[in-house]
Amino acid sequence: MALTHSKLSFPPAFAWGYAAAAPQIEGASSLHGKGPSIWDAFAARPGTIHGGDDLSVACDHYNLYAEDFALMRELGARHYRLSVAWPRIYPMGDGAVNYAGLDYYDRLIDSLLAEGITPWVTLFHWDLPDALEGQHGGWRSRRIPELFGRYADTVVKTLGDRVKNWITINETVCFTRLAYGGHDKAPGANEPAGVVNQTFHHALLAHGQGVRAVREHGGPGARVGITDNPAVLVPVTETPADIAAARETFAWANERVLGAIHRGGYAPALLEADGRDAPRWQPGDFDLISAPTDFLGLNIYTGAWVQAGPDGRPRTLSYPPAYPRADSPWLYHVPQSLYWGPRFCAELYRPASIYITENGAGYDDPPPVDGEVHDLHRRDLVRNYLRELHRAIHDGVPVDGYFLWSFMDNFEWQDGYARRFGAVYCDFRTQRRTPKLTARWYREVMWANALV
Ligand code: NOJ
């Protein structure tokens, strides 16, 4: 009997690519007029970043972008999600535009297009101009989304003839709650809940400003969406009771960002739970915040397990000590998050289209041996997650693309350069790039448009 080898194909025109962000790869943090970002200032404070690392050189992508895009093409990517650094365009956040910064992205986009790679541009990936933190208190202030709108106008007007896919903001919770309600992320202010909830509201306004800028200046064919990292709750057992428990927990956990945007207001239950710490808004805010978008971007790396408890109420289980995770300690292996995350989003928010704008794994990979890095651990993690994404698409979830985080190892925020997410190994001393096994495997996946 001849056994068949079933092929897990993805839909035609599925967008495959890599994702990265300016502050994590560019370096040149004070070159050609760039102003400091809050991350430059944060890294200058002792004890904030693992190993005392900073963003000044990173992958030197500022200078090496042409070589990087040639390698990206060789490795089969046809889509690339990048970000523009706000302090490169407006060094003080406000005030005069830095034309050298605009020219840089002009050249960078041309170089990418010359390699046949489609750009997806994120307008804000956490690198707030530090001057805005000093003058206005950063995201605590309503002034920030206004200034972000002006910056977004400038970028979209300059690049909009060539860039047709725009992402407004990246991972709201990471530059609001984790940044203003804790010490892990810049600016590392330990503010009370009321202040933190207000930073969320200002982030939502910035998202709205980004959508407005693209609608006004994006030109024909421009599309825009947010990239969020929802808390993904996954049913322990795929029974109706556990699925309902996970969905209910998912909706509640993501009410402040995805719920508010898609509902066009804050849920009464959220405001009640916030009490005196509830965010304040002004008339018209939600017209901006909930303006229709073209897609929903999701960054999904992990999930938490939920089941219907003995009383029928949902309960979230803790991870036992032996539960597998990556070297990034928060990154528990939950491949099913790439099934239930997109699925719950589709059911609750009904986006026209979903893109997985990030997924991947952080490990402290050792340097190449004989020019090779056998990162089977990363490859296997990604493959298992992609199987679940395939299942979601098969079940009707409208997922139209997947971006692996990241193209090359880079500045992993408070974890510095030791924690590597790249498909390509970066030697930060020599700036030599070495494709890992994951990159070679992923090329075959993109080429075949199927899991191999
Ligand atoms: C999400 C963030 O958008 C990205 O900047 C970060 O490096 C990856 N996750 C990995 O932690």
Image (cartoon, rainbow, N blue to C red):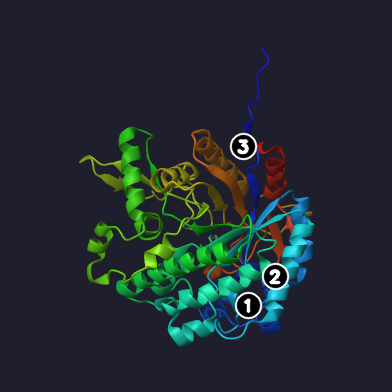
**In the image, is the residue at mark 3 within 8 Å of ligand 1 by its beta carbon?**
no
Relative to 164, say whether 339 is above or below: above
The label on residue 89 is: 1
Work out which residue is located at the far top of the displayed protein and give it: 1
Q: Mark 1 or mark 2: which comes first in sequence?
A: 1
Foreground pick, 222 / 452: 222
Q: Amino acid at mark 1?
A: Ile
Residue found at the far left of this picture: 311
Q: Which mark is residue 105?
A: 2
* Cα distance between the residues tagged 3 and 1: 38 Å
Q: Name which of mark 3 and mark 1 comes first in the sequence.
A: 3
Q: Are marks 3 and 2 in contact (CB under 8 Å)?
A: no
Q: Nearer the viewer, residue 162 or 60?
A: 162
Under circle 1, the secondary element is: helix
Residue at x-position 44% and y-position 72%: 179
Q: Residue at x 60, y 76 (%)?
A: 54
Q: Is residue 187 visible?
A: no
The image position of residue 319, as x and y in percent, is 39, 49
Tell me the kind of residue under disc 3: Pro
| Relative height, residue 66 to residue 130 (above, below) | above
| Location of residue 165 (image quadrant) | bottom right
Q: For the residues labelled 1 and 2, say whether their Cβ atoms are less than 8 Å apart.
A: yes
Asked if disc 2 is less than 8 Å from ligand 1, the answer is: no
Q: Nearer the viewer, residue 266 or 402?
A: 266
Judged from the image, the quadrant occupied by ligand 1 is: bottom right
- Residue neighbourhood size for the residue with mark 1, other residues' Cα within 10 Å, grouped as few (<14), some (14–19), many (≥20): many
| Marked residue nearer the N-terminal end (3 or 2) | 3
Residue picked out by circle 3:
11
Q: Residues within 10 Å of mark 2 (few under 14, many from 20)?
A: many
